[in-house]
C-alpha cells in the first residue's frame, strides 16, 4: 500500500491539485515550445486539468461516501438492536478512528447485552419460583409479564394471559378479589367464600419499562399465615384475660374469706369497711377491663356526617397538648366525629406515653384530592421494625400494662371509614401514624 493511501481527505485534495497543476504547467511549457497559440493552449490545458481534478475528487468522494454509508447502516442496526455488524478498518485516517470507535461500541454493547440477558434470566427464574403472584401491566392494563404463581391464582394457561386485559384474566377469581385487583387496591383483603375466610395481600407499584409507564401487581394468599397469627393472638388474649381475672378474683376471694371469718367470730369488725372498699375497687377495675374488650368486640358502624377539622383539633389539644403543623384545611370532612376523635385521642395518648418530649408531638392535616390525610408524629421509642406489621393486630402491645387494643381499634375505625392507617418509624427516632378520611359522602 502506498504512503498516499494513508493521507487525509484534505491532504489528498491538495496532492491531487498539486499534481494537476504541475501537469498543466508542463503541458503549457511544451505547447509554448512548439509555438502553439497561448490562448488556445491555456484553454485546452485548463479544461483537461479540471477534468482530471474532478475525476480524482470524484474517486475519493465516492470511496468516502461508501464508508460513511456503511457506518450509517451500522448505526441503524444498533438502533434496531442488531449488534452483529462490524466495519472493516479503512486507511483513511479521518474515518479510521471513527470506525474503530464504532467497532468498540458494538463490542461493549454486545457484552453488556449478554450480561443483562444473564441477569434477566436469573431474575426471571427467581420471580417464576416466587410463591407471590406477580403481574406486569402496561398503561392499557394489559398483561405483559406473569409468573407461575399468577397463572395458578388466575387459573389460566401462559398463552391465555399474555396480552389479555387484567379484567378478563380475573373472571375466575372470587368477586371481592377480582374487584380489588382491578381497582388497584393495596393492602390486606379479607372476605368469606363457602363459609371460609380468605385473606390476601395485594400491592401495586408504578414502574417504567422501555420508557413507558407500567404497573407491577403482586398478590399472595396469606390465609394460612393469618389464621396462625390470629390463633396466636387469641391464645395471648385468653392468657391476658385469665391473668387479669386471677389477679382480681384471688384477692377478692381472700378478702371475702377473711370477712366471713371476722363475721363468724365477731372480731376485728372495724376492718370490714376497708376490706369491702378493696373488694369494690378490684371489682370496678375488673369491670373496666372487661368493658374495654366488650367495646372492641361490638364496634358500631360509623355514623358519618360533615364536620369541620379545626374544632375537633381544638378539643383534643386541651386534653393532650400537641403542635399543629401547617394550616388546617377549611373544607369539612365526612366521618363519624366521635369515632375519629377516639382515634386521635388514642394516638396522642400513645405519643405522650412513648417517652417523647411534649414539644416534639405534632399533628398535621392536609387535603389531597378527595381525601383528608392526618399524621401524628412523636420522638418517642417507636416500634421495632420487625414488629410494625403486628402493631395493628388486636392484643399486641409494647407496654407492660397495655391491653393491645388501642391501635387495633384505631385501625378498625379508619378501615370502616374506607381509609388506611399506616405506621412508620422516623429516621431520627419516634413514630409517625398516618390515616386518611373522605372529604365528601361519595369520595370515589
Image (cartoon, rainbow, N blue to C red):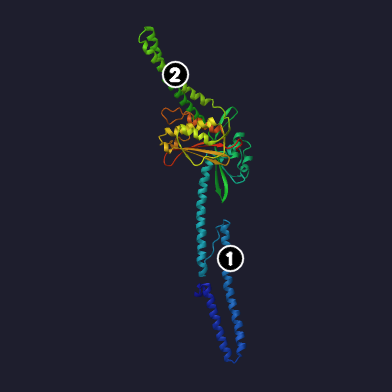
Number of the label disc, if any, that sits on residue 212:
none
- Residue 416 or residue 151, whichever sits in front: 416
- Is residue 282 shown left or right of residue 128? left
Q: Residue furthest left?
A: 268
Q: Residue furthest bottom?
A: 35
Number of the label disc, if any, that sits on residue 283:
2
Q: In the rendered view, tell whether residue 116 sits above or below residue 264.
A: below
Residue at the spot 58% in from the left edge and 72% down from the top edge? 61
- Is residue 154 shown left or right of residue 268? right
Q: Residues within 10 Å of mark 2 (few under 14, many from 20)?
A: some
Camera sees residue 103 = yes
Identify the image quadrant of the C terminus: top right
Q: Position of residue 190 (x, y in %)?
A: 56, 32
Residue at the spot 48% in from the left edge and 31% down from the top edge? 346
Q: Position of residue 241 (x, y in %)?
A: 46, 23
C-alpha separation, residue under disc 2 versus residue under disc 1: 97 Å
Task: Name the residue beneath numbered marker 1.
Answer: 69
Q: Position of residue 288 (x, y in %)?
A: 47, 22
- Residue 32 or residue 401, whichever sits in front: 401
Q: Position of residue 214 (x, y in %)?
A: 57, 46
Camera sees residue 420 = no
Amino acid at each position: 500500500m502506498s504512503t498516499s493511501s494513508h493521507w487525509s481527505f484534505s491532504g489528498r485534495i491538495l496532492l491531487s491539485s498539486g499534481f494537476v497543476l504541475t501537469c498543466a504547467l508542463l503541458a503549457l511549457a511544451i505547447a509554448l515550445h512548439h509555438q502553439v497559440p497561448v490562448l488556445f493552449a491555456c484553454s485546452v490545458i485548463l479544461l483537461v486539468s479540471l477534468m482530471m481534478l474532478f475525476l480524482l475528487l470524484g474517486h475519493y468522494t465516492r470511496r468516502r461516501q461508501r464508508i460513511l454509508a456503511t457506518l450509517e447502516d451500522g448505526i441503524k442496526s444498533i438502533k434496531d438492536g442488531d449488534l452483529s455488524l462490524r466495519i472493516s478498518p479503512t486507511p483513511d485516517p479521518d474515518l479510521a478512528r471513527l470506525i474503530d470507535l464504532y467497532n468498540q461500541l458494538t463490542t461493549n454493547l454486545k457484552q453488556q447485552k449478554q450480561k443483562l440477558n444473564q441477569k434477566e434470566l436469573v431474575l426471571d427464574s427467581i420471580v417464576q419460583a416466587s410463591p407471590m403472584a406477580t403481574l406486569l401491566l402496561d398503561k392499557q392494563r394489559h398483561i405483559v409479564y406473569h409468573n407461575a404463581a399468577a397463572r395458578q391464582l388466575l387459573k389460566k394457561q401462559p398463552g391465555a394471559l399474555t396480552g389479555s386485559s387484567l379484567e378478563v384474566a380475573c373472571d375466575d377469581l372470587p368477586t371481592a378479589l377480582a374487584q380489588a385487583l382491578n381497582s388497584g387496591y393495596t393492602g390486606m383483603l379479607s372476605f368469606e367464600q363457602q363459609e371460609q375466610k380468605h385473606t390476601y395481600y395485594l400491592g401495586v407499584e408504578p414502574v417504567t419499562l422501555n420508557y413507558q409507564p407500567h404497573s407491577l401487581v403482586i398478590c399472595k394468599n396469606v390465609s394460612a399465615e393469618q389464621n396462625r397469627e390470629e390463633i396466636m393472638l387469641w391464645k395471648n388474649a385468653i392468657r391476658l384475660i385469665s391473668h387479669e381475672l386471677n389477679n382480681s378474683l384471688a384477692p377478692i376471694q381472700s378478702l371475702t374469706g377473711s370477712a366471713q371469718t371476722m363475721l363468724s367470730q365477731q372480731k376485728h369488725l372495724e376492718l370490714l369497711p376497708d376490706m369491702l372498699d378493696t373488694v369494690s375497687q378490684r371489682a370496678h377495675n375488673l369491670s373496666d377491663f372487661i368493658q374495654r374488650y366488650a367495646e372492641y368486640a361490638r364496634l358500631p358502624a360509623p355514623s358519618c356526617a360533615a364536620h369541620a377539622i379545626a374544632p375537633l383539633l381544638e378539643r383534643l389539644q386541651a386534653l393532650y397538648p400537641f403542635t399543629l403543623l401547617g394550616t388546617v384545611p377549611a373544607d369539612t370532612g365526612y366521618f363519624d366525629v366521635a369515632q375519629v376523635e377516639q382515634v386521635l385521642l388514642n394516638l396522642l395518648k400513645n405519643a405522650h406515653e412513648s417517652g417523647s418530649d411534649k414539644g416534639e408531638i405534632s399533628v398535621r392535616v392536609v387535603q389531597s384530592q378527595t381525601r383528608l390525610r392526618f399524621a401524628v408524629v412523636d420522638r418517642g421509642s417507636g416500634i421495632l421494625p420487625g414488629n410494625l406489621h403486628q402493631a395493628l393486630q388486636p392484643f399486641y402491645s409494647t407496654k407492660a400494662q397495655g391491653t393491645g387494643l388501642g391501635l387495633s381499634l384505631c385501625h378498625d375505625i379508619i378501615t370502616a371509614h374506607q381509609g388506611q392507617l399506616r405506621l412508620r418509624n422516623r429516621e431520627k427516632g419516634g413514630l409517625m401514624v398516618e390515616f386518611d378520611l373522605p372529604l365528601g359522602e361519595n369520595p370515589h
